[in-house]
Amino acid sequence: MNSRVSRLAKILLAAAVLLVVGSRPLPAATPPARAGTVSVRLLDLTAPVPAAWVSQPPSSSMRLAQFRVPGKSSPDDAECVVFYFGEGQGGSPEANIARWQSQFSSPDGKPVKPSVQHFRVSGIPVTTAELTGTYARSMGMGPPAAPASDQTLLAAIVETAKGNLYFQLHGPKASVAANREAFLGMLRGIKKP
């Protein structure tokens, strides 16, 4: 009897996971790549992600991975997302940086200049951009969200052979600053398995 109940409980749990996640699989997590991280598969690459970041089911089909990045308290949480739009889709690094810049303003309403860096990891070009200020985040053709002050966006475009991956860590300035090195470590740790 107990084995039948246990088997039924496992089936019900699997069905509940399928209902929540849908048919899209979550990024595969493997044992820690280094202390305090888990390895996440993104297309044909892997990247280390801090174990403290909470994996969430992607909220859209354009997201390969999504994490809640804990702040000091729940309202201070940031979010890390990895977008993939398909081969040849999503725009150039320059076009994305210009779009992100258009979503930010300083407290006096002036444009915010992004800090941009270029490097290579595992032979793959990576461009990062960092912006801080009042953020009116928008996605695609939709209207921007209500502007939020004291926000930071740390974003990266990873130019893979299968198309660009777009990494974004965004949220309250202090929370993003506290996770800046972890985000950059994720990028620097990208590998071809």
Image: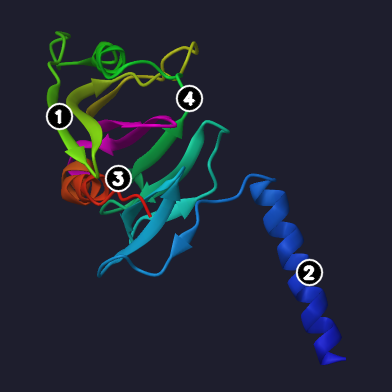
Question: In the image, residue 176 lies at what x, y percent?
Answer: 22, 42
Q: Are marks 3 and 4 in contact (CB under 8 Å)?
A: no
Q: Are marks 1 and 2 in contact (CB under 8 Å)?
A: no
Is residue 153 at least partly visible in the picture?
no
Question: In the image, residue 50 lies at what x, y percent?
Answer: 30, 58
Q: Residue at x 76, y 59 (%)?
A: 15
The residue pinned by badge 1 equals: 118
Q: Secondary structure at mark 3?
A: helix
- The magenta stretch spans residue 174: yes
**Separation (CA) of disc 1 from disc 2:** 48 Å
Where 42 falls versus 63 (above or below)? below
Give the class, few, some or many, for how many residues have Cα within 10 Å of label 1's Cα (few <14, many ≥20).
Answer: few
**Separation (CA) of disc 4 from disc 1:** 21 Å
**Separation (CA) of disc 3 from disc 2:** 37 Å
Q: Residue at x 77, y 82 (%)?
A: 6
Q: Which mark is residue 76?
A: 3
Q: Residue at x 27, y 67 (%)?
A: 36
Looking at the image, tell me whether mark 3 or mark 2 is earlier in sequence order. 2
Q: Amino acid at mark 3?
A: Asp
**Separation (CA) of disc 4 from disc 2:** 37 Å
Looking at the image, tell me whether mark 1 or mark 2 is earlier in sequence order. 2
The residue pinned by badge 2 equals: 11
Where 100 falls versus 188 (above or below)? above
**Separation (CA) of disc 3 from disc 4:** 34 Å
Looking at the image, tell me whether mark 4 or mark 1 is earlier in sequence order. 4
Question: In the image, residue 120 lies at what x, y percent?
Answer: 18, 37
In magenta, the rendered stretch is: 153-175
